[in-house]
Every structure is written in structure tokens, then in C-alpha cells.
């Protein structure tokens, strides 16, 4: 069951008055992010009953009356009171600040960790896992999720645990958006009934007569936010009602000369301005603290934020308080005494309602607004962690992110603030919220480009980051367009101080060319970039090592495995000395070394290296990290090449599942794992499943990269082998003919992929009875393979076994026996007598040469 409401508070506290059958307090097994209970919650009995009925019968939307779009009517307070009264009915109660999708993601990641799900802190894996756990009811069936202050349904619905026949879960949404009416039974929350206003006023002011309470309720319009504040104000000051009403009228007249607000906005502004005027006279530091907080999000603001002094002065009294814990404590105490903000001592945080923030901003001069907003930016910059890649820092980034957005830090001209904003763009990517990272970086890049020009160094740096996010998301056309634009900008305006940025962008252009299938063009650029980096930065500089690794990628894509191995070995040794053997940078290149050795035919060595790399990744970043999963996928291929087909299938199946869940079926990593799994299934004899998966993967490659791409060709080649084994030889030959022509044109006649394609095409000819044509093709292929790969490379040897079969078929038995014996002896020496390839050769069965697409 699902319900919808609208926002006001937050943080963790036990449902103290929820009792079980024996009178003891009951707390759900998982209880998180719940705001403190409102100890002066008043009335709303009928609304609470209607809310309970709505949750039991389906989705219910609790929305403000149409006259109160900005809130202040107590929507979140109603939801919060419901939570405390009904907590014992649930196994999980989880409160989610839902104004932005990134906040929802953060809360769901935290819930995944509280549930003990086997995922890390990355959003891209934790969110699907927790939604599935809630959908299936494992480990808890009865749950309540509160999405507080949700915006549009489109931005939130994807985070609802779905599926028919699910557990007895409940969703409660609070919102100011009337669109929720179309998805749920509406429950409108209006102002207090008059007797509820009187009750709240007298609850804090027992000396207040009913007549005076009625007078106050009338002037306050029964708006809960205004009534609560006025009640707290009078309880603290003891001000006579007549005096308060006089001040209220003065502030109302003053307000109306400036603007014409709606009635409820006028009421809130008037009530709060009475209090703020008094606070300004009594404690300027407290008022200035509120003014800065007005530019934060209406979310809890950790008090620790004010312990890091802003780099630039903000206001004299506040500056003193920020450097003196006693002064800061007094300022916060004054704010709390008059209920000018919510102070949560358990989490040591401050929170302001958005209406109150609007009142504070409206009463400031323009100079004060500029100064206080800048002060908020400097406080955030002083508190932002410095390493977005470190998972230990992600909770702090997540806590500050809403304040960075609401304070409009992206508009700050301060280079310090802009550097902070860039850090948050990186955090969103590394944390795994790729769509959030793209949206935030795209919006920021466009603003900075318009404000400072596209050659501004920080704008370029953010543009390069945005391009990386687009690349990871598989948006290759947008990625290529952006990197081409950045390169044009840098080549036009580059000076000595920006040469590193120019080289990085050129490296991105090279990877865009690989995505387009232009491996030769990519290699030319990567070689140029590396050579220039050595000249400008030196061979041991981190920038040079970055480009050395990328050059290795292009060398592998072009089949130059020995050159790649030499370069990668040197790069790895330098990274190991600089960063340590367990560093992600060193492990990335060590994995490339293992890849090179596999392609050079050293299958057992490659498998051993990759097993070590996988264990190091597990120790460094955990099982679910994408680096670990990619290494596992590569290990699966090495095991298959080494002859362990069952072990290979288990690893590639696992990697395919996890990488698809993380990035989607179209991602290069998921596609590679799927293609390798289809080969594993074929090697295990499951031809039908191998065909279905191979066909599906080939289609996805074409959809992702286009039909005219080396990876789509590799998928066609592997599928053709399965088709031939299924006796669909003509179809296999058709695919191999097209793949061979493509390889010759795009990769060159002597590229390893071209040799593999030629060998498989010869097998098609042999199966069709065109033995002489197969013989002629295998003779050329063996000679080329021995020259390109070496005579003792397993691929050269298995193609030689096919040549022996051709010779025997045309009656040249003596030559056939000689070739066969030479090939078998070579394979036994390289792979071991128990390897399936040796068994297959002994039985004179033709060998099939599969092909793995080179990583981009």
C-alpha cells in the first residue's frame, strides 16, 4: 500500500509512546532518519484516521490546501505523528528526504546498509538491491517508507518498490505538488480548526485566557507554522497579548508597503518578523546565523559546519561566534528559545522551514543577501571533503549536497566555491549516481560556460568531467561532440599552464575514436599524447603514467600485444613505486599486463596474474566494485583459454549479472561479459543457449556502437561459430564473409582479429565441402599467424591443426600427419596434455577461434 503527503522535519529517534501487548515500548527492527517527535503536536485526529485508512487501502496523497502551496500547514508533522503512533505495526520505518532524486538515492543506500545487503556504498548497486529486498519482503515484509517533500511523481516513482503480489509495504509521500492527485487518493491538509489553534496556544501558555487565545488565532489565520511560533514566542517573553497584536499590526503594515503577499505568506512573514526584530536587538550573531542558514536547504544543517571558520569574513558578530564556541552556543540557544528554527540535540543539527527562510531573505538588503549567500558558500567549501573517490567521505558529501544545490553555489564567482562544486560533481559519479552526476555537471558546465567563457580553466575541467560521465553512461555521440569542442577550445587558447588539460582532452578524443571503431586513429593520438607528456612532464609524472596506460589500451585494440606488454610493464612498475601495489591505478595496469599475456598465448600465466589482481581488488575496494567485477570477467576469459570451461562460465555469468545490474545491458563491460558467456556455453556444449545469448548480444552491440564497429564484428564472428556447430553453415559463412571483409578494411590484413576471422571462414568452407578453398585459406592464415603471433602461439598451433585436417581431406596424408604432430606437440607444451584443445586435436576435430572485443 502506498500513500502521499507533504514536507516539514527529520532525524532519528525511537517511537517512545508506541507500546506492545505488555505495555513495553516497541521499536521496529530497522528505524532510520526519523525526525524528532513534535512534543506539542496538536489535534488533527480526523486527518490521522483518514491517513491510516488511506495507507491500508492504497496510495494516499497528503497535500496542502491549494491556498497554501508553500507549506506551513503541517503536512510533514502529520506524517511524522503517524509514524510515531503506528511504528509498532512495521518491521522497517525509513524516512526519506525526497526533494531531489539524489537525496532519495542517498537514503536508500543507507537503508541497504542497515539491512545488511551484500552491496557496498555505491548507489548504482545499492539502490536496485534495496528495492528488490523490499519488493520481495526479504528480510522484512512489513515496511513503511516516507518520501518527505517529494516533487514531481516522475522524479520519485522509480524508487518505489514495485511488482504485483509484493509484501505488505506502505509508501507515504508528502508533497506540495498537486500532480500526486492523479496517482493517489488525495488527503488535503488545511489550517488548524480554531479550537486546535487555541489548544496549541494554551498548551505553552496556560495563563492565556481563551478570549486572548481566540484573538491571537484569528490574527494568525490558524496557520500552524505561525501559531506554533507565536505560542513559543509568548511563552518565552511573557509579552501581553495586546502588545503582541500591536507589534503584529505594525509589521503587517510594513510588509504590505513592500509587497503584496498571499494571506498565509503575510501571516507567516508578520509573525516571524516580530520575533526577528526582537532577536536582532538581543543577539545580532543569532540573527546573522539565521540569515546564513536561510541559504541552506530546508534540511538538517550539522552544527559542525559552523565550527570550520569561513575563509572570507561574513558579518562581524557572526565571525566572532564562528571562532568562539561559547558565543556560537549562545547564538544557537537564542534561536532555540524563540523556536526560530528546529534544534535537534541528538544529531546536533539546525533546520529551518522554507517559509521562514523566505521571510529572512525578504527582510535583508541586497548587500546582505549577497554577503550571506557567499558566507554559506564559504562555510560549505570549508566543510567539503577533499577526495570524492574515497567511500569514507561519501556520507559527508551526501549530507552537504542539498545545501550546495539550494545555496546556488554553482553561481558563485569564487574559485574556491567553484572548486568545491567540481568536487561534488566528481562525488556523484564515484558514488554511482550517474544520472545525478550527468544532470548536475551538465547544468553547472552550461552556467559556467555562459558566465566565464568556454576557455575558463575550471569550465574546461568540468566539461572534461562531464564528458567522462557521458562516456560511462554510453552516450558516445554526446561524449565525442563535447570532447571535440573542448579540444578546439584548448587548441585555440592553450598556454603553458593548460598543456596538461589539453593532453587529457586529447586522450578523451582518442577513446571516442575507439568507441567509433577507429582504432588506428586512436592509436595515433594516444602515441602523440604520450610522447608529448614525456617531453613536458617527464616519464615518472602521474600525468605521463595516465597517458601511458591509455596508449596501452590503443596498442591492444590494434593487436600490438608485445608493445603493449612492454609499455604496461614499465608503467606498472612506476605506478607501484609511486602509489603502492594495492592502489587502483597500479592494479588497473597490472590487469592490462595479464590481458596482454593472455593475447600472447600465455593463458596459465594470465590466469594466475588475474587471480592475484582480483584478490587485491577485493581487499582494496570490495567484491561489488566495478574494478573487481571487470577483473573477474577477464579472469573468466583467461580460465576458458586455460581450459577450465566450467570455472570460466561461472565467473563470466557472475560478472555479466553484476555488470548488467550496475550499468545496463548496453554497457561495454556488460556486453563483453555476455559475449564471453555465450562462448563459455558453447564450449560446454549448450549450443541453443549459446546461440540465443550470442544473437541477443550481437543485437545489443549493433544498437550500442553501430553495425560498422569492430565489437559488433567480433560478436558476429563468435555467433557464426555457434551457427556452424548447429549445422547452419550457410548462415555462418555469410556472417564470416562480412566480418572478414570488414576486418581487412578497418583493421588490416594482419590484425589478429583478421587472422581469427579468416581461420573460422576456412572452417565454414570445409563444412560446406569446399575443402580445396579451405586448404588454400588455412595455408595463408598459418603463415600469417606464425609471423604475427609466433609459431608457438596457441592460435597459430590450432590453425595448423585445421590445416592438417584440410591436407588429410585432400589425400596429402603424410603432410597432414607431420603438421598434426607438430601442432599437437606444441599445444601440449604450451597448454598441457589435459587441455581440451589437446584432446580435440588428438581426435582430429577442427578448432574454433573465438574473439573477445578489446576494452575501449
Image (tube, rainbow, N blue to C red):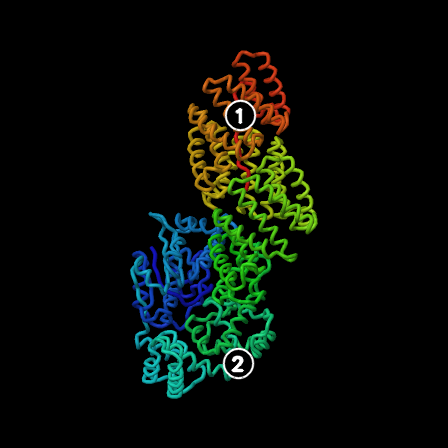
Say if residue 244 shows up in the picture.
yes
Q: Quadrant of residue 727?
A: top left
Residue 284's tag is 2
Can the viewer see residue 21?
no
Residue 463 drawn at (x, y percent): 53, 55
Question: Which residue is at 45% across, 73% downward?
Answer: 357
Q: Residues within 10 Å of mark 2 (few under 14, many from 20)?
A: some
Residue furthest front as drawn:
492
Which SS class for mark 1?
A: helix
Dot 2 lies on which element? helix
Q: Residue visible at 36% across and 72% down?
A: 42
Q: Which mark is residue 160?
A: none
> x, y (%) of residue 78?
36, 67
Residue 666 screen position, x and y as percent: 46, 43
Q: Foreground: 174 or 170?
A: 174
* Along the viewing direction, whichever of 83 and 753 lies nearer the viewer: 753
Pointer 1 residue: 759
Cα gap from disc 2 to disc 1, whole angstroms: 83 Å
> How many marks can you see?
2
Q: Please tell me whether mark 2 or mark 1 is closer to you in this view.
A: 1
Residue 546 lies left or right of residue 3; in this view the side is right
Between discs 2 and 1, the one toward the N terminus? 2
556 relative to 251, above or below: above
Please give the name of the residue rendered at 62% of the width and 31% of the height, measured from the top-left corner.
602
**Does 696 sit above or below residue 259?**
above
Amino acid at each position: 500500500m502506498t500513500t502521499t503527503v507533504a514536507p516539514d522535519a527529520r532525524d532519528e529517534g525511537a517511537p517512545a509512546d508506541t507500546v506492545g501487548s505488555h505495555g513495553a515500548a516497541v521499536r521496529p527492527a530497522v528505524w532510520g532518519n526519523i525526525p524528532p517527535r513534535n512534543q506539542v503536536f496538536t489535534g488533527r485526529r480526523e486527518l490521522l484516521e483518514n491517513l491510516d485508512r488511506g495507507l491500508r487501502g492504497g496510495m494516499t496523497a497528503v497535500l496542502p490546501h491549494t491556498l497554501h502551496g508553500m507549506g506551513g500547514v503541517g503536512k510533514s508533522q502529520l506524517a511524522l505523528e503517524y509514524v510515531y503512533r503506528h511504528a509498532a505495526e512495521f518491521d522497517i520505518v525509513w524516512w526519506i528526504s525526497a526533494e531531489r532524486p539524489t537525496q532519495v538515492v542517498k537514503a536508500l543506500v543507507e537503508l541497504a546498509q542497515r539491512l545488511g545487503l551484500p552491496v557496498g556504498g555505491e548507489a548504482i548497486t545499492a539502490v536496485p538491491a534495496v528495492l528488490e529486498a523490499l519488493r520481495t519482503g526479504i528480510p522484512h515484509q512489513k515496511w513503511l517508507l516516507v518520501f518527505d517533500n517529494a516533487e514531481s511523481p516522475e522524479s520519485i516513482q522509480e524508487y518505489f518498490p514495485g511488482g504485483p503480489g509484493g509484501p505488505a509495504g506502505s509508501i507515504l509521500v508528502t508533497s506540495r505538488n498537486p500532480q500526486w492527485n492523479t496517482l493517489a487518493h488525495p488527503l488535503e491538509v488545511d489550517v488548524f480548526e480554531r479550537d486546535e489553534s487555541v489548544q496549541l496556544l494554551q498548551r505553552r501558555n496556560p495563563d492565556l485566557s481563551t478570549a486572548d487565545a481566540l484573538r491571537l488565532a484569528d490574527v494568525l489565520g490558524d496557520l500552524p507554522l505561525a501559531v506554533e511560533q507565536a505560542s513559543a514566542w509568548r511563552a518565552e517573553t511573557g509579552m501581553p497579548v495586546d502588545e503582541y497584536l500591536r507589534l503584529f499590526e505594525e509589521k503587517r503594515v510594513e510588509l504590505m508597503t513592500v509587497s503584496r503577499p498571499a494571506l498565509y505568506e503575510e501571516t507567516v512573514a508578520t509573525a516571524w518578523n516580530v520575533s526577528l526584530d526582537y532577536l536582532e536587538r538581543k543577539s545580532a550573531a543569532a540573527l546573522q546565523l539565521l540569515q546564513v542558514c536561510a541559504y541552506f536547504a530546508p534540511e538538517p544543517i550539522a552544527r559542525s559546519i559552523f565550527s570550520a571558520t569561513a575563509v572570507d569574513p561574513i558579518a562581524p558578530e557572526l565571525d566572532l561566534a564562528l571562532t568562539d564556541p561559547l558565543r556560537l552556543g549562545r547564538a544557537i540557544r537564542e534561536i532555540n528559545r524563540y523556536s526560530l528554527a528546529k534544534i535537534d540535540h541528538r544529531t546536533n543539527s539546525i533546520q529551518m522551514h522554507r517559509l521562514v527562510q523566505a521571510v529572512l531573505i525578504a527582510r535583508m538588503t541586497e548587500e546582505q543577501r549577497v554577503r550571506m549567500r557567499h558566507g554559506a558558500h564559504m562555510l560549505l567549501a570549508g566543510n567539503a571533503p577533499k577526495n570524492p573517490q574515497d567511500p569514507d567521505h561519501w556520507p559527508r558529501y551526501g549530507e552537504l549536497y542539498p545545501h550546495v544545490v539550494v545555496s546556488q553555489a554553482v553561481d558563485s564567482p569564487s574559485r574556491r566555491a567553484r572548486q568545491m562544486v567540481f568536487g561534488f560533481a566528481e562525488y556523484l559519479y564515484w558514488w554511482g549516481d550517474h544520472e545525478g552526476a550527468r544532470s548536475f555537471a551538465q547544468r553547472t558546465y552550461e552556467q559556467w560556460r555562459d558566465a566565464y567563457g568556454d576557455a575558463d580553466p575550471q569550465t574546461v575541467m568540468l566539461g572534461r568531467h562531464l564528458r567522462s560521465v557521458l562516456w560511462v553512461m554510453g552516450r558516445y555521440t554526446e561524449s565525442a561532440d563535447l570532447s571535440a569542442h573542448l579540444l578546439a577550445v584548448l587548441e585555440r587558447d592553450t598556454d603553458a599552464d593548460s598543456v596538461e588539460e589539453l593532453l587529457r582532452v586529447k586522450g578523451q578524443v582518442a577513446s571516442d575514436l575507439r568507441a567509433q571503431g577507429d582504432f588506428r586513429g586512436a592509436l595515433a593520438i594516444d602515441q602523440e599524447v604520450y610522447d608529448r607528456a614525456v617531453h613536458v612532464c617527464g616519464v615518472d609524472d602521474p600525468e605521463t603514467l595516465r597517458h601511458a596506460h591509455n596508449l596501452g589500451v590503443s596498442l591492444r585494440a590494434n593487436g600490438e600485444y608485445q608493445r603493449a606488454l612492454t609499455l604496461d610493464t614499465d608503467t606498472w612498475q612506476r605506478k607501484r613505486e609511486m602509489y603502492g601495489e594495492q592502489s587502483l591505478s597500479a592494479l588497473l595496469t597490472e590487469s592490462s599486463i595479464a590481458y596482454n599475456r593472455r593475447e600472447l598465448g600465455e593463458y596459465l600465466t594470465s590466469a594466475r596474474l588475474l587471480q592475484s589482481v582480483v584478490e587485491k581488488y577485493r581487499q582494496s575496494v570490495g567484491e561489488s566494485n566495478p574494478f573487481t567485477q571487470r577483473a573477474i570477467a577477464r579472469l573468466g576469459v583467461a580460465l576458458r583459454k586455460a581450459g577450465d570451461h566450467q570455472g570460466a562460465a561461472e565467473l563470466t555469468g557472475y560478472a555479466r549479472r553484476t555488470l548488467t545490474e550496475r550499468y545496463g545491458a548496453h554497457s561495454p563491460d556488460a556486453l563483453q561479459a555476455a559475449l564471453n558467456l555465450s562462448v563459455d556455453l558453447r564450449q560446454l556444449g549448450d549450443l541453443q543457449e549459446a546461440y540465443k545469448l550470442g544473437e541477443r548480444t550481437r543485437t545489443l552491440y549493433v544498437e550500442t556502437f553501430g553495425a560498422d564497429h569492430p565489437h559488433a564484428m567480433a560478436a558476429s564472428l563468435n555467433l557464426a561459430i555457434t551457427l556452424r556447430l548447429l549445422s547452419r553453415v550457410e548462415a555462418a559463412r555469410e556472417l564470416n564473409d562480412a566480418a572478414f571483409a570488414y576486418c581487412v578494411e578497418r583493421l588490416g590484413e594482419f590484425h589478429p582479429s583478421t587472422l581469427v576471422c579468416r581461420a573460422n571462414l576456412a572452417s565454414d568452407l570445409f563444412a560446406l565441402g569446399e575443402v580445396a578453398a579451405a586448404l588454400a585459406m588455412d595455408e595463408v592464415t598459418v603463415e600469417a599467424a606464425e609471423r604475427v603471433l609466433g609459431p608457438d602461439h596457441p592460435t597459430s598451433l590450432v590453425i595448423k591443426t585445421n590445416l592438417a585436417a584440410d591436407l588429410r581431406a585432400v589425400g596429402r596424408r603424410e603432410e597432414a600427419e607431420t603438421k598434426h604432430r607438430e601442432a599437437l606437440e606444441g599445444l601440449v607444451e604450451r597448454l598441457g596434455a589435459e587441455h581440451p584443445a589437446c584432446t580435440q586435436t588428438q581426435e582430429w576435430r577442427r578448432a574454433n577461434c573465438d574473439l573477445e572485443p578489446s576494452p575501449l
